[in-house]
Amino acid sequence: MKALQVSRLTKSYGSVPVLKGVSLELEGGERVALMGPSGSGKSTLLNCIGGIDRPDGGSIQVGDIQLEQLDEEGRCHLRRDTVSTVFQFFHLLPTLSVRENIEFPLRLQNIDSKERGERVTKLIEEVGIEKRAVAFPHELSGGEMQRVAIARALTIRPRLILADEPTGNLDSRTGESILDLLESLSDHYEIAMLVVTHSREVTRICSRVVEMRDGALLEEVTA
């Protein structure tokens, strides 16, 4: 089963068309880079796939879930259980420690405390922040915050990760280490990943690059 199937997706804001019949597929465990200028529709596409925005037409399927059949509660469950997002600006909860931030999605799923602890401890080790587990976001570097965000995204064991400029707020050296981490963890857990980026450096961890312009996808190329 494919991780993601987007078919003939359309979306307008008022009289302005933003997505114009977009179709895209990702296999399980595949990483695809989505590139294009600002205003081309990349963020709108991500928001539709993540269940934040509703498209006007077309279909989106994540695994066996048809998004157009979901009500608002169902879309919340999608974001809680199936699709994770890694943001450019991390979006960590400032009053929670590193460990608590990573654990938070599991609390929403009502996972028992023993399993929560085991999953969080393993991910803290895998992203290399064992010594920062009790620190708070304001005490972390940008690279450390992104490692926490990646661990938080993985903790629900999603089928798909949407990464929105995951290295855009980092220096080049830190960005490289984050790309290596995303590559190794998505391979290890066999999680598909759609990465919105302006950086050609990001494409090195992707099997395909898709360019978007004026609300439409151009021809795909091998990364």
Image: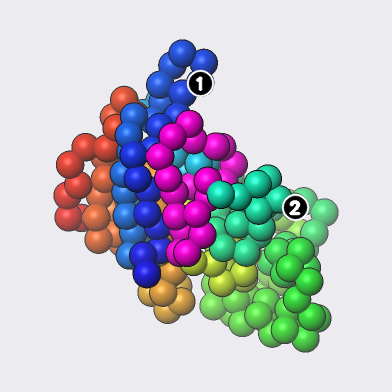
Tell me whether circle 2 and circle 1 mark residues in contact (CB < 8 Å).
Answer: no
Q: Residue at x 79, y 80 (%)?
A: 112
- At a point 40% along the width and 21% down the height, the residue shown is 17
Name the residue at 66% across, 58% down. Answer: 77
Span colored in magenta: 49-68
Question: Would you call the spot at circle 1 few (<14 residues within 10 Å), some (14-19), or many (20 or more)?
Answer: few
Residue bearing the label numbered 1: 13
Which of label 2 and label 1 is nearer to you? Answer: 1
Q: Does residue 36 sit above or below 74 in this rendering?
A: above
Which residue, given by chain and number where applicable, does mark 2 sit on? 93
Residue at point 78% right, 68% down?
107
Q: Above or below — where is 206 with respect to 120? A: above
Q: CA distance from mark 2 to mark 1?
A: 31 Å
Judge whether residue 200 can be spotted in this image. no
Query: Residue furthest toward the top?
Result: 15
Identify which amino acid the numbered label 1 is placed on: Tyr
Count of labels in the image: 2
The image position of residue 2, as x and y in percent, is 36, 65
Q: Which of 149 and 145 lies nearest the eye of the viewer?
A: 149
Q: Amino acid at mark 2?
A: Leu
Asked whether 52 falls inside the magenta stretch, the response is: yes
Assign the C terminus to one quadrant of the image. Answer: bottom left
Quadrant of residue 216 within the rendered picture: top left
Q: Is residue 165 magenta?
A: no
Q: Secondary structure at mark 1?
A: strand
Image-based side of 78 in relation to 103, left or right: left
